[in-house]
């Protein structure tokens, strides 16, 4: 028996979603939805997963559903969920920030008229999001470096960035 993760996009809320989940309740370890995005963990064989996906797609055949299935990692919203170092030991999945390839990262430029406190605040909030989405400190550190490099390209001085990024620490 394997654990499979599924990520569904453009999944409308179906009135017959609950009966389908009830049918698969023995295999569905987790099923979470945010608007039209769904994350599911299915325990079973690949055939069980295929049956679950088939049932999802046939709930409303007129709708086009994008499904990703993987045994070890999946991207969902702004995180990558994966079987990291702790999975074989305690059976716990890990997370790290996911950056969509087409994201233009249109951050507020340093030269804008926004108050310094506002700039410090949103940089702190983004850093806290990176911490929250990182199971491992190394994943956070890598994401923080990429974030800092993008801000430097937006004209943020190193001293300002250091002050902003020090407001939130991985602990």
Image: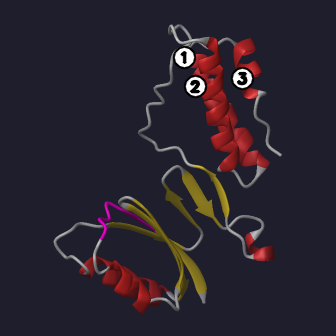
Q: Which residue is mark 3?
A: 164
Say few, some or many: other residues with alpha carbon within 10 Å of mark 2 (under 14 / 14 to 19 / 20 or more). Answer: some
Left or right of residue 112: residue 85 = right
Q: CA distance from mark 1 to mark 2?
A: 7 Å
Q: Residue at x 44, y 37 (%)?
A: 103
Nearer the observer: mark 1 or 3; the answer is: 3
Give the x, y percent position of residue 131.
70, 44
- Give left or right: position of 88 versus 100: right
Q: Is residue 54 above or below residue 75?
A: below
Question: How many dots with numbers?
Answer: 3
In this picture, is 64 found above or below 2?
above
Q: Quadrant of residue 95?
A: bottom right
Tell me, yes or no, whether the highlighted magenta stretch contains residue 75.
Answer: no
Q: Is residue 115 above or below residue 103?
A: above
Residue density around tag 3, few if under 14, some if 14–19, many if 20 or more, within 10 Å: some
1, above or below 153, in the image:
below
Name the residue located 78 percent from the left edge and 27 percent from the top edge: 166
How far apart, in angstroms, are the residues tagged by discs 2 and 3?
A: 14 Å
Q: Position of residue 80 (x, y in %)?
A: 57, 56
Image quadrant where one finds the N terminus = bottom right
- Tell me the number on the disc at residue 154: 1
The residue that mark 2 highlights is 150
Mark 2 or mark 3, which has the lower sequence index? 2
Contact check, label 1 and label 3, Cβ < 8 Å = no
What span is in magenta?
7-13
- Asked whether disc 1 touches disc 2, contact meaning CB atoms under 8 Å apart, the reply is yes
The residue positioned 34% from the left and 78% from the top of the image is 17
């Amino acid at each position: 028996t394997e654990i499979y993760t599924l990520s569904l996009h453009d999944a409308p809320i179906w009135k017959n979603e609950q009966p389908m989940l009830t049918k698969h309740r023995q295999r569905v370890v987790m099923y979470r939805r945010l608007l039209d995005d769904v994350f599911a963990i299915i325990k079973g064989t690949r055939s069980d997963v295929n049956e679950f996906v088939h049932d999802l797609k046939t709930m409303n055949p007129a709708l086009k559903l994008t499904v990703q299935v993987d045994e070890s990692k999946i991207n969902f919203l702004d995180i990558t969920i994966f079987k990291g170092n702790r999975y074989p030991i305690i059976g716990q999945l890990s997370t790290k920030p996911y950056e969509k390839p087409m994201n233009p990262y249109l951050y507020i430029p340093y030269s804008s008229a926004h108050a310094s406190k506002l700039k410090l605040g949103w940089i702190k909030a983004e850093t806290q999001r990176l911490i929250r989405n990182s199971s491992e400190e190394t994943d956070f550190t890598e994401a923080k470096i990429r974030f800092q490099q993008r801000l430097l390209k937006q004209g943020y001085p190193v001293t300002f960035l250091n002050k902003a990024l020090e407001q939130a620490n991985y602990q």
